[in-house]
Image (spheres, helix red, strand yellow):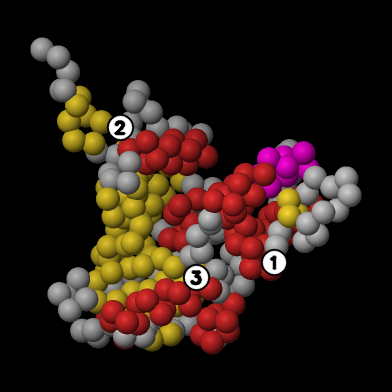
Amino acid sequence: MPEQLQETKQEYVIKREKTKVITSNITTSFDEALNKYEHLRNYINEISLKIGPPEWMTSLDFSLRSRTEFNILYPVGDPIFIHIYKLPSGEALYNVIEPELNDNEKKKLEQIQTKIVKYAIEDINFNNIEEVRRYIIDLFNRVIDFQRRRLFSDRVYIKNQEEYDKLLYYLIRERFGYGYLESFLRDPYLEDVHILGLGPIYVVHKIFGMLKTNRGFKNEEDLNKYIIKYSQIVDRPASETRPIVDAILPDGSRVNFIYGKDIS
């Protein structure tokens, strides 16, 4: 009898215990954040028309648990913001707000990642996360330029400060952080992050409990690539021959990987 593929059962769960990620400054003023970040302005304008403007908070406490309705926005490290709100239906949602790269910016990021390789030092040791951050910024600055046509320069042209900040964020996120899940790991109010196959990612919030997010994997290839990449970080790669892996990420977070498909 021929083998038949059954339902995909990829699963990726991060247990937030003592996560340490490379963070940036946290803008605590709502007006300043709106002035600095176009992606935040666009989001606020759109969501306010649907459910009203969110309440800006720089810290959360357990008294919020008593609220039957909530519409809260808070920063977790520039340029990421988190919006938690309850729909009239009673469903509570968790939205990540971060800038998106256009096609041209994606090409620039690829060029930057290629060029920094020749400047990166192997086997370099760091005493703390801040040293890593400064090292990344130094590499980034070596390969970019705000001047479009500098003679004999092979640097990547950056048109303005907004593009600079966006590309630096994605460089840190993709090369030195946790990629697509970076925003979750920056949120100090999360306990667990659950990826149960394709579809929405769910998080367990310390105050609001289980929430559906606006993030998720749309195809099995991207999900499996992510699981393989980050299971390799802990030197315990998930694969068809070892589909279940329990490990500790470099930042101290416990993680459980379940890879692949059941076959009968």
Look at label 2 and name its amino acid.
Gly
Residue 231 vs 264, above or below: the answer is below
Residue 104 vs 165, above or below: the answer is above
Residue at mark 1 to residue at mark 3: CA–CA distance:
16 Å
Q: Nearer the viewer, residue 34 or 169?
A: 34
The residue located at (47%, 41%) in the rendering is 230
Q: Which mark is residue 206?
A: none
The residue located at (33%, 35%) in the rendering is 259
Q: Which residues are magenta?
A: 112-119
Image quadrant where residue 147 sits: bottom right
Q: In the orientation shown, which residue stands out farthest toward the front?
A: 149
Q: Earlier in the sequence, mark 2 or mark 3?
A: 3
Q: In the orientation shown, which residue stands out farthest toward the top?
A: 1
The residue located at (29%, 39%) in the rendering is 10
Residue tagged by mark 3? 39
**What is the crowding at mark 3: few (fewer than 14 residues within 10 Å), some, or many (at least 20)?**
some
Marks 2 and 3 in Cβ contact (< 8 Å): no
Residue tagged by mark 1? 160
Residue 110 vs 264, above or below: the answer is below
Residue 214 vs 264, above or below: the answer is below
Look at label 3 and name its amino acid.
His
Closer to the eye: label 2 or 3:
3
Residue at mark 1 to residue at mark 2: CA–CA distance:
43 Å
Q: Nearer the viewer, residue 106 or 259?
A: 106
